[in-house]
Image (spheres, helix red, strand yellow):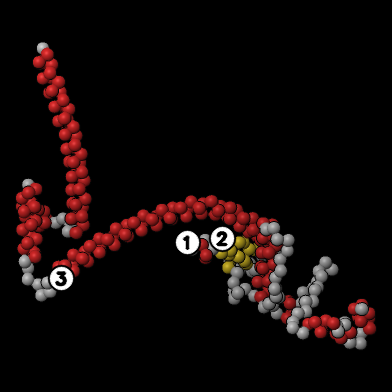
Amino acid sequence: VKALEGALSFHNQDIVRRETTVQQMGVLVSEAREKLRKAKAEAIAICPKTPEWEAKFAELPSNADELEDKIADAEARLEGITLNNPGVMREFKERQKKINDLKRRLEDTITWLTAQRSEMQDIRGQWLPVLLEIVGKITTSFSRSFCQIGCAGEVKLGEHEDYDKFSMQIMVKFRESEELQLLTATRQSGGERSVSTILYLVAIQEVTVAPFRVVDEINQGMDSVNERLPFKEAVRILDIMNGPEIKSIANNFNLGMLVGSRPRLCAVGA
């Protein structure tokens, strides 16, 4: 009995060793099949399957050793072909290697670019809704102001793939027969541009912390009639005098220099 138990133990250990070998062979078979699949895909990419080529492949040996011999024989015959330039084949192989390297680099670049675009979309999703909400408040105020003067207007966010080209698009309509049009330096008149600018500044006042706005030459482009606007009592006019000679002029300045012999205005100026 002891002898049989010893033999049984030996056989059990042998079975374990063989099972381990079978598992290892299974892994090798899986790796070989994957290698075969990739090689087949590469071969089809280089030379698409046709009935003619399938017939030639069917004539090839199925044994790996015989196939290797067949490949070696074909390479030998290929190298034996007489060429006018013996370096052509070497140059071909070098270029083929460079092409393969560039393809791998391209794939890596595409993968990196895809990841960067995904990250950019995530970041964009954080600030764009907030910006659109702000633009919505601006266009509500802008449209309300235009409606009060019998016209129409709105403000839109001009989105673009290049973030440097994002813009605030001011759309206005001053005539009933027109559609909303983008405010530009040439499409609207000087007065229309001035009105649009002021109402836009009023609209953004609700979403900014700046207490006031300074607009230079707001009357630029207006005709001589519309430029002379009536000023209310709440409007204060400031004459700004500036220049390299302003100091000497300011020291000797008096209102009489401007109004001449009008004593009442001189008295007011004094």
What amino acid is labelled 3 in the image?
A: Val
Q: Which residue is mark 3?
A: 88
**Label 2 neighbour load within 10 Å: few <14, some 14-19, many 20+:** some
| Residue at image point 53% right, 51% down | 126
Element class at badge 1: loop
Left or right for 257, reference 27: right
Which residue is most to the top?
1
| Residue at image point 73% right, 61% down | 211
Element class at badge 2: strand
Q: Nearer the viewer, mark 1 or mark 3?
A: 3
| Residue at image point 9% right, 56% down | 71
> First in sequence: mark 1 or mark 3?
3
Q: Which residue is mark 1?
A: 161
Q: Which residue is mark 2?
A: 157
Mark carried by residue 257: none
x, y percent for residue 136: 61, 55
Q: How far apart, in angstroms, are the residues tagged by discs 3 and 2? A: 59 Å
What amino acid is labelled 2 in the image?
A: Leu
Q: Nearer the viewer, residue 68 or 39?
A: 68
Q: How far apart, in angstroms, are the residues tagged by discs 1 and 3? A: 46 Å
